[in-house]
Image (cartoon, rainbow, N blue to C red):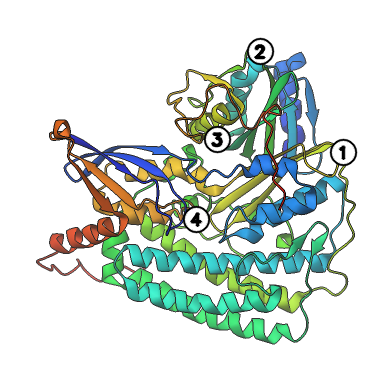
Amino acid sequence: MSVASDVENKLKETFGEQILKVRIPRERRIFVRIPLPKVKEVIDYLKQSFGMVHITTITAVDVGEDIEVLYHFFCQGVTISLSTFVPKTNPVLDTITPVMPGAILYEREIQDLLGLKVKDHPDPRRLILPDDWEEGVYPLRKDYKVEVKEG
Amino acid sequence: MAVTIPIGPQHPALKEPINLTVTVDGETIVDIGVRLGYNHRGIEKAGELGNYIQDIYLTARICGICSHIHSTTFCQGVEELLGLEVPKRGLYIRTLVCELERIHSHLLWLGVAGHELGFDTLFMYSWRDREIVMDLLEIISGNRVNYGMNTIGGVRRNITDEMKPQILKGIQQLKERTEYYLGVASTEVTFLRRTEGVGLLPKEKAIELCACGPTARGSGVEYDVRRDDPYAAYPYLDFKVVTSDLGDVLGRTVVRVLEVIESCKMCRQIIEELPEGEFRTKAPRKVPAGEVVSKTEAPRGELLHYIRSNGTDHPERLKVRTPTLANITSVLHCLKGGYIADIPIVFAAIDPCMACMDRIMILDSENRNRKEKQAISWEELRKYSMKWYSDRYQSPSPLKGEARRV
């Protein structure tokens, strides 16, 4: 049995209904959707039982009412992407830096560019946007329009 | 008494800007903070505006040194979304350019490292030899940088039979020269004194901070996307993943130099085993809705593109994670507890793609009320570091025993 399907089975065994959706599009890739309050727990579980310690990055996508946040991990040759939805009306999520120290800059990055608030982040200062950038304007949200100049 | 030194962010003549806030006690660095984004060009947003063909050339312009690996990552991601099978010859040519690009990037790095150490002979030599690989890239693609070789479904140019002997000859020369540099890096006293034990990154720390590429492999972490998540023609090639247990700047140097030798072997194998047939296949303009994580091993480490498509001819979201960002956390850890004089080489040792810290301002905390500022350029810091080390070794004590071989 491949590592990816092993991850799928173990997660379903442990978290049951909390695992909303699993997709294995090809070998060495797995996408798992989980509810927002379970993120830390699932990451901690994968760290303990699969030795998952490498986070590659965090992607955030504006999907309308919500922002989808994907955590990309690499473990035993498989890229595990955990995804969750954060409502725009209350765009707050817990920090995972205490369990995954490598996530510190990626969490600062999504705070800047998509306006998510990472609760209890050890260093929540701006990372990418300039100091004089207007508060409440997040360039990677879909409502931020870019002026395209021809030529 | 702790003093805070802001380093950076701007200098138009150099590479990309970054700001480091270094707190020092005497010569020792006690704390260090980072501020990025001075060169943020909004490429991820621009990627959403362009169509897939335009985005190939956009991603190639993320980095001037490793442009091909970015377009490779993007193209193979889109190919996966399309379910497109790329002809084997196309994959081989794509991989050949990847490896030539790695050789050129690592030789460039070796020169920069030599320069930061005040070893400019090494800088001149390695950059002279880098011309060989630049010429090879020009023969293949028509360009010395930004090769524009990739397209969705394969590559844009073929490798002809006339090119093969020229490429093989160049690779042989490069291999011989690199073997000589391996000798220099492992025996030359000047080089060893500035790199051995400098910028230590223990293996556990490298794993914890999610370092990647030669930075991680120089600390004994055996992780290489080419082997662990194979793509393009890597499943068909024989190569070793080079690691070193030293964990210092010397370890990172040795890993890079040995990787160049491995890359030379791979290039030879690709040319000798180049499959016949088509080198690209036709791709539709519109991509069905889906999402994909595409990963490659860039010269600096693991590179990730996340692409989400929405059924049209332009992506819904394009996310890029470059290896330098992953290694910034590690370099900050390496610098802590080190000397000011080691900042240039330790920072250079991760091969940063945005390390332009030219303007340094020293704020003396005792004189702060007088608003006295002293600005030092990166060049002056480099000279300062060389002088500091030469004063330190003024009474030349012979190295204990033989200079160590690595």
- Amino acid at circle 2: Thr
Do the residues at pointers 1 and 2 share their chain?
A: no
Q: Which residue bears the numbered disc 1?
A: B311
Name the N-terminal-most of marks 2 and 3.
3
Q: Name the subunit of mark 1.
A: B
Do the residues at pointers 2 and 3 share their chain?
A: yes
Whether residue A28 appears in this view of the structure is no
Q: Which residue bears the numbered disc 3?
A: A53
Do the residues at pointers 3 and 1 share their chain?
A: no
Residue B348 appears in which quarter of the rendering? bottom left
Q: In the image, what residue occupies the spot 63% across and 56% down?
A: B61
- Amino acid at circle 4: Pro
| Disc 4, SS | helix
- Amino acid at circle 1: Gly
Decide if residue B71 is on the left or right side of residue B367: right
Q: Which residue bears the numbered disc 2?
A: A89
> Foreground mark, 4 or 3?
4
- Local packing at callout 1 (Cα closer than 10 Å; few below 14, some 14-19, many 20+) is some
Do the residues at pointers 4 and 2 share their chain?
A: no
Decide if residue B201 is on the left or right side of residue B216: left
Number of residue marks: 4
Q: Name the subunit of mark 3.
A: A
Q: Position of residue B218 (x, y in %)?
A: 45, 55
Q: Which residue bears the numbered disc 4?
A: B214
| Disc 2, SS | loop
Q: CA distance from mark 1 to mark 2?
A: 28 Å
Q: CA distance from mark 4 to mark 2?
A: 42 Å
